[in-house]
Amino acid sequence: MDLPAHLPLPLERGAPWWYWLAGRPALDFTNTLRERWNRRVETLVCGEDLGEWLVAAELLPATPAVTDDVLERARTLREAIDAGVVASLAGQPVPDATLIALARELPHATRPETLTRTEDGGVAVVLAEPAAPAVHGLGLLARDAAEMFGAAERIRVCASDTCSARFFDRSPAAGRRWCSSRGCGNVEKARRHRRRQKETPQ
Ligand SMILES: [Zn+2]
């Protein structure tokens, strides 16, 4: 998933550059900082971006208000998750700092309970809307990351040299190598083909 070489940076808005192939929200989230190996392109540029991203990721039903503080908190959470991803890729345990960051947001993953009257006049306990929806979204991301680190051996980074896409390998044989077989997979196959042609004496 290469970005155009002549992208005006920093971006004004991130939405055109989001992508969704990681197989779970926690890794789609880490992929919002693109080209980690080179230009480190921030696609959660402003609070509106984060609000829209949480809806696009199907974590929230409606775009929440996002303060600058919550945006900063989201980026901190994202980089804490990514530190765990990098450690997992290197076969190391998830760092304590990552666990602390996840534990800080986890309580916001749950929604309070409230009462409602049912159609037949009875009473039912239902989940209330979260008081701070954007923060609830961060809680859901922290929960997904925590569950993911329980199966850390399936965390991958795309095998392309020019792609930092993280993804969760759900293939039965755990053999997925590319963020997308049509994108990076094809580009790499073409590269190898050219290399072979050069090596073959004409
Ligand atoms: Zn890729």
Image: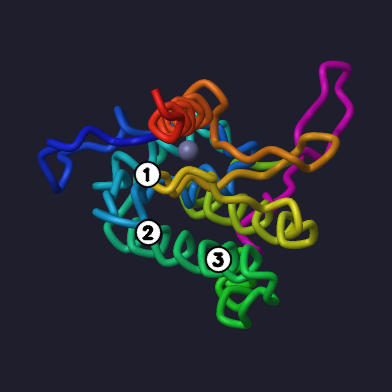
Q: Tags 1 and 2 in contact by the CB under 8 Å rule? A: yes
Say which residue appears at 61% left-offset and 79% top-offset: 95
Secondary structure under badge 2? helix
- The picture places residue 182, in percent across and down from the top left corner, at 52, 21
Q: Is residue 119 part of the magenta span, yes or no?
A: yes
Question: Cα distance, mark 1 to mark 2?
Answer: 9 Å
Residue 50 numbered tag: 1
The residue tagged 2 is 70
Say which residue appears at 61% left-offset and 58% top-offset: 142
In this view of the protein, which residue sits in the foreground, 95 or 1? 1
Say which residue appears at 84% left-offset and 39% top-offset: 173
Residue interval drawn in magenta: 106-126
Residue 86 numbered tag: 3
Looking at the image, the residue that sits furthest to the front is: 202
Secondary structure under badge 3? helix
Q: Is residue 116 part of the magenta span, yes or no?
A: yes
